[in-house]
Image (spheres, helix red, strand yellow):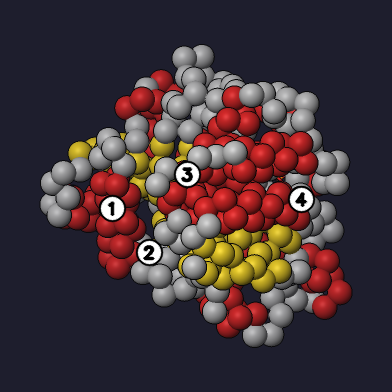
Amino acid sequence: MRVHKIASIPADGIGPEVISAGLEALDALALRDGGFRLEVMHLDWGSERYKKTGIYIPEGGLDLLKTMDAIYFGAVGAVDVPDHISLWGLRLPIAQGFDLYANVRPTRILPGVESPLRDAGPGDLDWLIVRENSEGEYAGHGGRAHRGLPEEVATEVAIFTRVGVERIMRFAFDCARARPRKLLTVVTKSNAQRFGMVMWDEIAAEVAKDYPDVTWDKELVDAMTMRMVRKPRSIDTVVATNLHADILSDLAAALAGSLGVAPTGNVDPQRRFPSMFEPIHGSAFDITGKGIANPVASFWTAALMLEHLGERRAAAALMTAVEQVCAAGILTPDVGGKASTKEVTKAVVDAIRGYNFPV
Ligand code: NAD
Ligand code: MN
């Protein structure tokens, strides 16, 4: 029996609602598959704990996480805590502390979910956006001087290192190679940004030599937004900087129908540390406690986590179950349905129980 140790950190808002739904589905999958078991460590790290104790991650917390195989994360953010405090208090210490440098964001229009693109239907927009997750525009380098005075100045410096760019480029080429179309688009802004972005282009061309079986092209980030809308079928795998991919993946989530279905993984491809998997959405204060949060993002997130743990068969089973339930119109209000979180979850668990695993 394969055993995988998972740290569950549901945290704030709808996080606990969607993560408990995901854990139910994972339990059902492990039973149905029969080949693996999950040992889940439940952690109550979040803004409530912060408001009581002044810290998000208790003493020794990161060391505890290091003993786990993966982290299943909900969302962090509370109405009465500034967002940069919650983000830098909980998510970033894990992502940066463990050097989870590859952020992967798959998109696909699920059956039953409508895209705002007129000609796009189920199965379209099958993209994988790879976001550099450790440096670039979010390196945290900068400062402010002469605050409040007319001569106030602020800098926000983007940092690009050869090591950082080369490792994300190799990861992206590996991802592209593993997908049927073997197609990669390298996104930069190397016409206007002459240093870091030109280095990206150069490193892309160098790394591409090791992947003769992968077709690749380059696109400037502004042109890429148009291509995503106008020629979505010309895209498969995409690699871009921390900021560019952040923006492109919100566009991708919107084009695929809803934030409520979009998953992401913060991955350490070298597996020195546990990788962290989370829905892209935040804590959604406006619907917290109403029982209508869409659990599909957290199911898809669980599928990414299972793939990372080597449980490909179970990951495929979970996505099949989710697609069946969506196709049957059992959807939450954000994607045009009337079902509750619990009803969608029950339908997915039932579909998993009835799933015939290929041998
Ligand atoms: P949000 O993702 O929480 O919500 C945006 C909109 O999408 C809301 O109307 C919400 O109801 C809807 N939505 C989101 N997820 C949904 C789901 N699963 N089902 C149905 N509807 C869903 O973004 P926001 O409002 O900008 O941020 C709220 C808080 O979450 C802030 O504190 C922010 O910092 C935090 N946040 C955290 C993360 C994270 O933990 N990774 C990501 C984004 C935002
Ligand atoms: Mn974002």
Q: Residue at x 36, y 47 (%)?
A: 239
| Front tag of 4 and 3 | 3
Read off the residue under disc 1.
174
Q: CA distance from mark 2 to mark 3?
A: 28 Å
Q: Residue at x 55, y 39 (%)?
A: 355
Q: CA distance from mark 2 to mark 1?
A: 10 Å
Which secondary structure lies at badge 2?
loop
State whether residue 317 appears in this view. Answer: yes
**Marker disc for residue 17:** 4
| Front tag of 3 and 1 | 3
The amino acid type found where label 1 is placed reads: Asp
Q: Is residue 323 above or below residue 291?
A: above
The amino acid type found where label 2 is placed reads: Pro
| Front tag of 4 and 1 | 4
Read off the residue under disc 3.
357
| Front tag of 2 and 4 | 4
| Front tag of 2 and 3 | 3
**Among the two numbered marks 2 and 3 on one chain, the one whose residue lies closer to the N terminus:** 2
**Among the two numbered marks 2 and 1 on one chain, the one whose residue lies closer to the N terminus:** 1
Which secondary structure lies at badge 1?
helix
Q: Is mark 4 within 8 Å of ligand 1?
A: no
Disc 3 residue crowd, few under 14, some 14–19, many 20+, Cα 10 Å? few
Residue 75: x and y in percent read 68, 55
**Among the two numbered marks 3 and 1 on one chain, the one whose residue lies closer to the N terminus:** 1
Residue 209: x and y in percent read 13, 52
The amino acid type found where label 4 is placed reads: Glu
Q: Is residue 61 above or below residue 276?
A: below
Q: Is residue 267 left or right of residue 16?
A: left
Q: CA distance from mark 2 to mark 4?
A: 29 Å
Read off the residue under disc 2.
269
**Displayed quadrant of residue 206:** bottom left
Q: Given contact means CB atoms under 8 Å apart, are the residues at marks 2 and 1 in contact?
A: yes
